[in-house]
Image (tube, grey):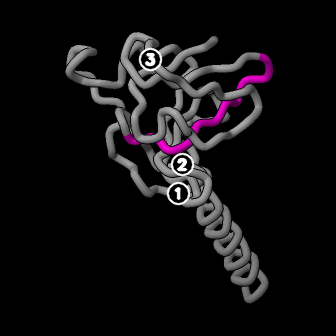
Amino acid sequence: MRKMMTVLATVAVLAGGSLTMAGPASAAVQSNCGSGAQMCLFYHSQAYGYGAEYGTSNNVRSFNPNVNGGTTYAFKAGRYGSAGAGQSVWNNAGAAGDYSSYRNFAVWYSSGWTGVYDVVPYGKRIDLTKTYNNDASMGWI
């Protein structure tokens, strides 16, 4: 009987351990940067730890809800934290990351892929300079 209790206790601890380990994995599911989405924007710059993220593999003509018919694109908590989670992506990005293996993308100051822009090289993360907190669209180049 005592052996059976020890086995059951061990199983319970192992089950509990695996449930505890699932916490971080489910947190990572909140955002898809690097695991599906290839173009990513981060709420903060590198100096502030990037924070929340927004990711997609599709071109975005406008993050501005006044231009795109009312759609609000929002940052989500991700691997670099939750600072900025829930905030609009429009005019709030501090850095960008390109998780593709063969093509660059750009972040533009204006909607419709116009105005000044920052190029994000594939496989790299950069702090935005020309479009820091002034991002309105992004797409593959």
* Residue that protrudes farthest toward the bottom in the picture: 2
**Front in this rendered view, residue 3 or 30:** 30
Type of residue at label 3? Gly
**Residue positioned 50% across, 14% down in the render:** 59
Vertical side of 47 occupied by 36: above or below = above
Residue 58, image x and y in percent? Answer: 53, 15
Instruction: Return the disc, 1 or 3, that comes first in the chain's sequence.
Output: 1
**Magenta span of residues:** 92-102
Disc 1 to disc 2, how far (Cα)?
5 Å
In the image, residue 94 lies in the stretch drawn in magenta? yes
Of tags 1 and 3, which is closer to the observer? 3
Quadrant containing the C terminus is top right
Mark 3 lies on residue: 115
Label 1 close to label 3 by CB (< 8 Å)? no
Mark 2 lies on residue: 78
Q: Is residue 111 left or right of residue 51?
A: left
Quadrant containing the N terminus is bottom right
Label 1 close to label 2 by CB (< 8 Å)? yes
Instruction: Return the disc, 3 or 2, that comes first in the chain's sequence.
Output: 2
Disc 1 to disc 3, how far (Cα)?
30 Å
Check disc 2 and report its element: helix, strand or loop: loop
Mark 1 lies on residue: 81
Judged by its main secondary structure, the magenta piece is: loop
Type of residue at label 2? Gly
Vertical side of 99 occupied by 9: above or below = below
Residue 121, image x and y in percent? Answer: 72, 27
Disc 3 to disc 2, how far (Cα)?
29 Å
Question: Dot 3 surroundings within 10 Å: few (below 14), some, or many (20 or more)?
Answer: some
Check disc 1 and report its element: helix, strand or loop: loop
**Front in this rendered view, residue 116 or 43:** 116
**Residue 38 in view here:** yes
**Residue positioned 60% across, 43% down in the render:** 127
